Each structure stands twice: as C-alpha cells, then as structure tokens.
Image (cartoon, grey):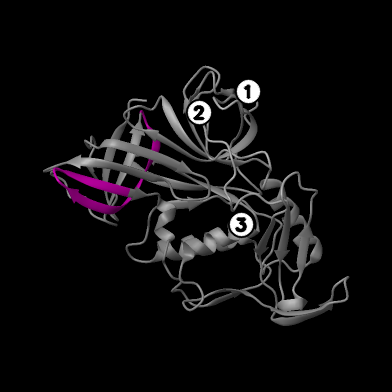
Amino acid sequence: MSARVLLQELPSGRILDWAVPLTGADAADVLSGPRGLEGSLPEGYPHPVLEWGSALWVEDSGTFHGGGIVTTVEHQDRSIRVGCVGVTGYAASMPWLAPREDLIDVDPLDIVRKIWDHLQSETGGNVHLTVDPLTTPVRVGEEEREVEFSTGAGDDVSFETGPFRLNAVDTQDLAKTIDDLAASTPFDYVEHTYWDGENIRHRLELGHPSLGVRRTQMQFDTRVNLSVLPTLGLDEDTYASEVLLIGAGEGRDAITGHVPATPARLRRVAVLADKSIRSRSAAARVAREELARRTTHGTVSDLVVVDSPTARIDELGPGDTIHITGPLLTGAVLDHWVRVTEVTRSIDDPSTAALAVIPAD
C-alpha cells in the first residue's frame, strides 16, 4: 500500500490538499462502529484543519483505507495532533429534532435509515452516507398496552409496551439508538468510502444477523505470522461458571434465566440485566450464550499479525472469524476461533495490523 492522505473541507466536500504530510498515522476499520484515524501534521501546515469542518481520508489507487471527520486538533510542541472519527460517528450525541414519530411494527433497519435521512436533511448535516436497503423479519414497536401474565413458576409479571419513539426528549443520542437496535435485532454495520466520479461518498453496509466471513483458508500461527505473542487469560470480571440474567419486570416478578454449569474451579455467578427480554425462554437463551463466552479456557483480545501468503491482511475485515494457533512461551497453546472487531494499520507500515478480537460463537 502506497497511500496518500486527502484533506477535505466539510460540508462543501472540496479537496484542499491531495498529499497531506500526516505522520505516525494509524487507520482503524471497526465493526458496528465508526472508523478512526490519528496522526500528526507538521508545524506551519498551511491548510485549515478544523474540528467538524474537515475530514482526512487515506486513499491508495482509488481505494480508501480509512479516515474520518476531524474531531480533535491539538497543538503539541512542533506538531499538530489530529484525531478523526468515521462518518457514523457524526450521529453521536445528536438528538432527534424532526417531528415526533411513534413507530409500530417497524423493521429496525428502517429506523436506521430514518435516522440518517433526518440527520442529512438538515442544513450542514449531509455527510453523503447511503444506507444499504437490507431488511429483516424483526419488528419493534407495539400499540400501547399493559402486559400481564404468569410465568411457568407461578409468578405474576406485568409491564407496559408501546411504540418505538423518536422525539427530542427521549432520543438525544442517535448513534446510541442505532447501536441499541444493532444489539437487540441483531445486525452489524461497517463503513465504506469510495469515489463517485470526483466526489467522495460513503456507504453503510448492513448485515443481519451479522457481517463477516469465516476465514478457513487463513492461517494465524504464533510461529508464522503473529509477530507479538498474545496474552491469554481471563480477568476477574470475565470468568463465570453460571449466569443469572434478569429481564422485564421488577423484583420477584422479573423474568429470569439461570444457566448453571458444573465448575472445574470455584463457582462464580455473573449477574446481567436486560429489560428488553420478556420471556423465560429468551432469558435462558441469552444466559446460555453469555456463559459460552465466559469460557474457562481463557480468551485473547488483541493480536498483531504480519502480512503473509497464508494470511493477506488486505483480505481481512471487521466481522471476519479466524483461527489462531501455536504455542506460547509459558507452555500454553492457542487453539481459538476469534471474531475480528477492529483492524488498525499504520499508513507508513501496512505490512502489519493490530486486531481487536472477541471469542467466536
């Protein structure tokens, strides 16, 4: 990759500099979150770089490899430290200021499109983002009513249901609204940037229930292309031998899911709450999934990989699932499937990448 960095004026979209001297720069691609870019400009850089008034984009032969809207500009000694967030970060801390909407029986992805239509319809708010037309069978929002029933254990449960509301009082962070929908539906999203003629445009790729590919042909081995031996273990808040999940309702009337296991170590119980869960079967399912994530064999959260014939970094993206293997110096042996949630690469040395990973389902 022989990349250049472009400086774009916002909201006009005009390119101010086609070869920005950004040094020490790292570009990050993120699963279900905004991209990121950080780096330093030299003292006396002649073009204006303004928070929320500029964007920096990493481009190589027509392909974009990251960048975002400038959100921080810090003058440090003889350099200017710049931080950028991808276009989806524009929605963070932005309220819904269109007329109130009470949505019933609506696809969550239609709400995502509605949010971006609203944000980009306002003067000075068009970031030129197109949202995929994907749909899901999931529906949110109901007629307002009070639900009362008895659980299989004989407990009475009551709570109110209602429309999915978009208004200035209840919806003051539209990025959080999207992320909450992504978690509950579920769906993933990834940002893409591309040329549309002479204009820079963006696409929000959607995937239900998830994005990414299981990379069975790639090899990630501590003896081959993992340049830094990863840390394997569990912190004190991660390990659990059973999970108690508390759903809708209050006190003794709450929906609960309890999944125990026969511990090989001391018994530890993880207690979680999710008031959107309204049935015992759903609570038990989520509790089982959570217990599976809290494996007793240890987890890996960060990897540094080297580009190699058996694992091309350019082919790896957020959401992909990879297998890591090989011995550690302590005598432990990696044999883990993990899902990539972030890929960070240096502009100056793209032959390596730092990966943030989570245990694969």
Give the residue number, with chain letter if any, for mark 2.
229
- Count of numbered tags: 3
The overriding secondary structure of the stretch rendered in magenta is strand
**What amino acid is labelled 1 in the image?**
Gln
Q: Nearer the viewer, mark 1 or mark 2?
A: 2
Work out whether mark 1 precedes mark 2 in sequence or the reverse, and give the earlier one. Answer: 1
> Which quadrant would residue 335 be assigned to in this image?
top right
Residue 183, which numbered label?
Answer: 3
Quarter containing the C terminus: top right
Identity of the residue drawn at 78% across and 56% down: 259
The spot of residue 28 in percent (x, y) is: 42, 41
Quarter containing the N terminus: top left
Label 1 residue SS: loop
Residue 326 seen in render: yes
Work out whether mark 3 precedes mark 2 in sequence or the reverse, and give the earlier one. Answer: 3
Image side of residue 327 versus residue 56, left or right: right
Label 3 residue SS: helix
Image side of residue 320 versus residue 159, left or right: left
318 versus 289 height, above or below: above
> Which quadrant would residue 275 be assigned to in this image?
bottom right
Query: Is 140 one of the magenta-colored residues?
Result: no
Give the residue number, with chain letter if any, for mark 1.
217
Query: CB under 8 Å between callouts 1 and 3?
Result: no
**What amino acid is labelled 3 in the image?**
Ala
Span shown in magenta: 61-83
Disc 3 packing (10 Å; few <14; some 14–19; many ≥20): few
Disc 1 packing (10 Å; few <14; some 14–19; many ≥20): few
The spot of residue 278 in percent (x, y) is: 74, 69
